[in-house]
Image: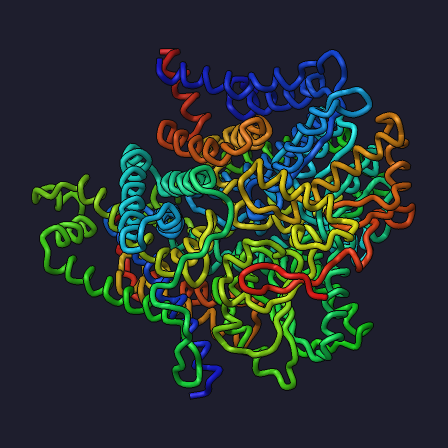
């Protein structure tokens, strides 16, 4: 395989894996509550920044990481409890504004609690690039791909084998029926936010050594994760992952072969094109409207 | 009932501050220094040290007795890096707060949006932004303290020629600083017999530049790479550069002249060169260097107060404030036209950016020699002879 | 004329406010803020037709605003066109774009529609930033003043009256639209698309129509901003401004034209009043957004009106 193409694909896969994790976060919350959480990117930011802060305070990485993830989960739960739950039943637009307001609030808090500077995190297993098909990949990228895969498998097991997971799925199909079956829908909602926050934080921690982290790193990542979730089809976990990987690769190939300045525009044009022909995304369920 | 109270308190909260805004000024008129800076937002690492520096030195000047027998008062607003907000705040400084001089404009966009206002109002304005277009063509009321991006290109090309590097790959970001510097480098390259053999770009929040760098790497006859960048991009470019083992010298812009950059890029930064103000190597300057006293002084005072590394952007704000103060001293008043002419007449003033020689045609006063060439060696900056 | 009808009563009140306000505007800074409010209000009135009445969503309207601003700027500054002609051409161009792009985009629903408009806005903003030879790139470009038959429109006071007039016209148009058969068709759509279809309304045609109108409102407001400020930067074309606009509409009250005006006024004033808070501005802004949507989900004006109605009983 052409070495240049190999490089583009490897880079695309790495960033695609991150988009996939963020998109999964969107998908999980959407599934449980039909809310698009525009603050999802901020969970990514919290994961990275909190780890940097804990590590800077002297905690070894093995402790700083779980602490940061727990912190993000706490924020996710608070978000659901204080911002989303009180507004249940509100229109789509209102909920969008609420989560956008939450993302602004979280960014503002980040500049107060931490600072406005860029921060780097130590790579988990060193910086020596590895040669693969004539291209180079950082060990950290392998971590990103590996952990993403593991998370996916675990989530799959969670949703299909555990009772809580199945309860979450049931709620996403029909909340009323789920409630009638004795499922605590409120708890499922809370759980979905907590789970998405954890996913976002893990994504943030994984890429911080490659891409650096700062108070506003969540904005673009959140946007791209949302785009990936839509591309894959809202409500489909597999769709979110495929959407994320596809977006990452399209961006990388676009930058490499077409125009590096326009690569984001190219990616969005492709997303729009897909939506025009498949209005529910690649794997989205065709929605039937009840009269 | 609850709604009524909520509404009433909301209205009160919203409109009460309006009343405060119209209060008349205090008895012995202080000298008002106006500022609009990007303290928050994407350009925060410009505006934040600038704000801190202005606060610190207004305080120090007041502690030393003020200026012309009056106290100094800093009126500063946060533009968030947005040009229209900057414009509105500049108007507020001119019309509402009635300041005597404006030191501000962290980014070129903000500065240029404000230029028509200060020209119409006859307000001396010292900009803290980089692009050459701010002072070329010369505008009567607009001055600036940072070196221009064109000077950065020239300094880099001089160093490249000294190392016999001729075929250069260019990579830049989407921001105003990046685009402006890229345009200037393309313009002046022929003057130094430099050939730009590749020209790639990356986006604002991009986290991976290996695609662009791979294209540059594969360009025939590549001898050096120049990253005209600012902010997060250059650190990632540097790391990707090492990852791809491109093997030619890498030059960065003066926009990342800070210890932060070395911390972020890590070992990948080793050997990277860039043009910077003497401020970065303050302690290692020879005692005979004319700038040593000023840069060491600022560096120590800033670090002692804010417990964080000094930055060249803060240095520009320091120069701006000191130049304004010096001009007012020479004019003996705060009369705007007098201050403006006094600014133009400043010669041989030693600042953190270099030795300043203003004139009616040159409202920046620095030349290429004000830029030193620095290299990253063992995790810190060293001066290249 | 029924003075209590929202149409004439509200319009008269708005005209009165515009006429009387200059007595409270003590210097050019205040005029500037008033003009900014007016321009934002024009965009919001149009956007409200799309979001509030037609029940659609657009997270990319700053794109139309930006196209209006840059269209006028480029045609007058780079090609020397007379500003009135540039305004007409730009508005026409944007309307055409909205027509062409609206058809496929408005077939989407809900979050897919949100994403499509978001994507559209981002693509426009990327093009504006990248084509720097034409647009001046991220650092922006200068715009000559607006002249009509040799008469220059410059200065805060002049533009205050221009903006005030334009806002009145926009509100009048919007109110008339809402009460017209087309408007009723829109509201039927919002209530139930299937029901409206059964009644013989072509949903796509109605949606695209209102999309184009709201785009035109935004474009004209953009052209006005460009000539008034004398300088534009891509900041106004981006995602954040689109969000700001939607927030203004939702805050003020969806399906309420005057609510849109109030939303624009409040959210334009807020940053000016919060300057003392400096570091805390983002936190306060975000908190205000959340609190308003949670406690006043239908927006400020409709909630206020229903409270007053309850009192009257």
Task: Give above or below for C157 relative to A89.
Answer: above
Coloring basis for residues: rainbow
Task: Give above or below for B74 relative to C128.
Answer: above
Q: Position of residue B352 (x, y in %)?
A: 73, 47
Question: In this orientation, does residue A268 appear?
Answer: no
Along the line of sight, the residue nearer the viewer: C1 or C64: C64
Residue at image coords 9%, 52%: A163
Q: Position of residue B137 (x, y in %)?
A: 85, 52
Along the line of sight, the residue nearer the viewer: A102 or A199: A199
Q: Residue furthest bottom?
A: A1
Q: Is residue B346 left or right of residue A248?
A: right
Question: In this orientation, does residue B310 appear?
Answer: yes
Residue at image coords 84%, 34%: B327
Q: Position of residue A90 (x, y in %)?
A: 33, 36
Quadrant assignment for the C terminus of chain C: top left
Residue at image coords 78%, 25%: B67
Residue at image coords 49%, 66%: B267
Q: Position of residue A19 (x, y in %)?
A: 38, 61
Along the line of sight, the residue nearer the viewer: B357 or C42: B357
Name the quadrant containing residue B181. Answer: bottom right
Quadrant assignment for the N terminus of chain C: top right
Q: Is residue A268 left or right of residue B187?
A: left
């Amino acid at each position: 395989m052409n070495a240049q193409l190999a490089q583009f694909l490897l880079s695309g896969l790495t960033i695609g894996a991150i988009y996939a994790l963020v998109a999964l976060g969107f998908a999980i919350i959407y599934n449980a509550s039909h809310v698009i959480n525009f603050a999802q990117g901020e969970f990514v930011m919290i994961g990275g920044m909190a780890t940097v802060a804990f590590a800077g305070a002297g905690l070894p990485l093995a402790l700083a990481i779980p602490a940061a993830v727990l912190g993000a989960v706490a924020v996710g739960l608070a978000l659901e409890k204080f911002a989303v739950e009180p507004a249940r039943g509100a229109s789509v637009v209102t909920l969008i504004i609420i989560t956008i307001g939450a993302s602004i609030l979280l960014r503002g808090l980040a500049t107060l609690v931490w600072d406005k500077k860029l921060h780097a995190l130590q790579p988990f297993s060193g910086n020596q690039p590895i040669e693969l098909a004539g291209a180079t990949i950082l060990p950290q990228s392998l971590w990103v791909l590996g952990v993403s895969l593991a998370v996916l498998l675990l989530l799959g097991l969670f949703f299909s084998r555990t009772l809580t997971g199945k309860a979450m799925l049931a709620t996403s199909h029909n909340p009323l029926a789920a409630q009638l079956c004795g499922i605590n829908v409120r708890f499922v909602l809370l759980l979905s936010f907590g789970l998405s926050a954890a996913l976002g934080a893990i994504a943030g921690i994984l890429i911080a050594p490659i891409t650096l982290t700062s108070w506003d790193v969540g904005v673009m990542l959140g946007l791209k994760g949302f785009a990936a979730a839509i591309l894959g089809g809202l409500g489909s976990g597999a769709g979110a992952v495929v959407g994320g990987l596809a977006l990452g690769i399209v961006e990388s190939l676009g930058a490499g072969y077409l125009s590096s300045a326009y690569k984001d525009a190219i990616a969005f044009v492709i997303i729009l094109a897909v939506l025009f022909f498949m209005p529910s995304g690649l794997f989205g369920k065709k929605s039937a409207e009840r009269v | 009932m609850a709604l009524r109270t909520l509404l009433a308190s909301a209205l009160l909260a919203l409109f009460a501050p309006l009343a405060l805004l119209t209060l008349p000024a205090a008895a012995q008129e202080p000298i008002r220094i106006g500022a609009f800076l990007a303290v928050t937002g994407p350009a925060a690492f410009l505006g934040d040290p600038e704000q801190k520096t202005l606060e610190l030195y207004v305080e120090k000047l007041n502690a030393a007795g003020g200026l012309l027998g009056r106290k100094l008062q800093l009126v500063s607003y946060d533009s968030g890096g947005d040009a229209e907000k900057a414009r509105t705040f500049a108007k507020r400084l001119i019309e509402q707060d009635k300041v005597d001089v404006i030191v501000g404009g962290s980014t070129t966009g903000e500065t240029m949006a404000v230029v028509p206002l200060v020209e119409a109002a006859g307000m001396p304005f010292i900009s803290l932004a980089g692009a050459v277009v701010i002072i070329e063509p010369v505008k009567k009321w607009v001055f600036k303290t940072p070196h221009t991006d064109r000077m950065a290109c020239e300094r880099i090309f001089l160093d490249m020629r000294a190392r016999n590097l001729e075929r250069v790959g260019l990579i830049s970001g989407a921001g105003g600083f990046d685009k402006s510097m890229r345009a200037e480098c393309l313009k002046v390259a022929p003057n130094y017999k430099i050939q730009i053999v590749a020209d790639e770009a990356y986006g604002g929040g991009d986290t991976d530049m290996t695609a662009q760098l791979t294209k540059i790497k594969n360009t025939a006859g590549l001898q050096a790479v120049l990253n005209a960048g600012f902010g997060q991009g250059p650190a990632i470019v540097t790391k990707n550069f090492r990852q791809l083992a491109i093997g030619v010298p890498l030059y960065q812009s003066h926009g990342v002249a800070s210890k932060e950059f070395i911390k972020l890029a890590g070992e990948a930064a080793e050997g990277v060169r860039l043009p910077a103000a003497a401020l970065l190597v303050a302690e290692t300057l020879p005692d005979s260097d004319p700038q040593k006293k000023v840069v060491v002084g600022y560096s120590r005072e800033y670090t002692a107060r804010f417990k964080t590394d000094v930055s060249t952007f803060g240095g520009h704000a320091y120069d701006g404030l000191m130049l304004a103060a010096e001009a007012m001293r020479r004019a003996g008043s705060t009369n705007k036209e007098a201050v403006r002419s006094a600014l133009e007449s400043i010669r041989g003033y030693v600042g953190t950016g270099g030795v300043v020689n203003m004139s009616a045609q040159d409202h920046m006063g620095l030349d290429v020699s004000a830029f030193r060439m620095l290299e990253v060696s063992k995790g810190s900056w060293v001066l290249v002879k | 004329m029924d003075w209590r009808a929202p149409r004439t009563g509200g319009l008269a009140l708005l005209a009165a406010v515009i006429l009387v306000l200059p007595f409270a505007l003590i210097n050019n800074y205040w005029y500037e803020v008033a003009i900014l409010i007016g321009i934002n209000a024009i965009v919001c009135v149009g956007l409200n037709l799309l979001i509030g009445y037609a029940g659609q969503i657009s997270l990319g309207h700053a794109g139309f605003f930006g196209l209006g601003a840059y269209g006028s700027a480029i045609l007058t500054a780079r090609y020397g066109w007379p500003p009135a002609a540039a305004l007409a051409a730009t508005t026409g161009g944007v309307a055409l774009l909205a027509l062409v792009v609206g058809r496929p985009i408005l077939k989407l629903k809900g979050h897919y529609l949100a994403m499509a408009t978001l994507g559209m806005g981002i693509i426009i903003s990327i093009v504006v930033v990248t084509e720097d030879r034409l647009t001046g790139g991220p650092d922006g470009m200068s715009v000559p003043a607006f002249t009509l038959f040799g008469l220059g429109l410059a200065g805060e006071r002049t533009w205050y009256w221009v903006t005030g007039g334009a806002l009145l016209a926009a509100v009048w148009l919007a109110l008339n639209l809402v009460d017209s058969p087309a408007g009723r068709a829109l509201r039927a759509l919002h209530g139930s698309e299937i029901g409206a279809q059964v009644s013989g309304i072509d949903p796509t045609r109605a949606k695209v129509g209102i999309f184009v109108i709201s785009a035109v409102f935004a474009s004209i407001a953009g052209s006005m901003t460009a000539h008034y400020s004398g300088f534009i930067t891509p900041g106004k074309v981006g995602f954040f401004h689109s969000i700001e606009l939607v927030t203004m509409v939702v805050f003020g009250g969806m399906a309420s034209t005057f609510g849109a005006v109030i939303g624009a006024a409040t959210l334009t004033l807020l940053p000016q009043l919060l300057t003392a808070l400096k570091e805390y501005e983002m936190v306060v802004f975000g908190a205000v957004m959340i609190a308003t949507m949670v406690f006043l989900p239908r927006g400020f004006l409709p909630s206020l009106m229903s409270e007053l109605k309850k009192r009257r009983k």
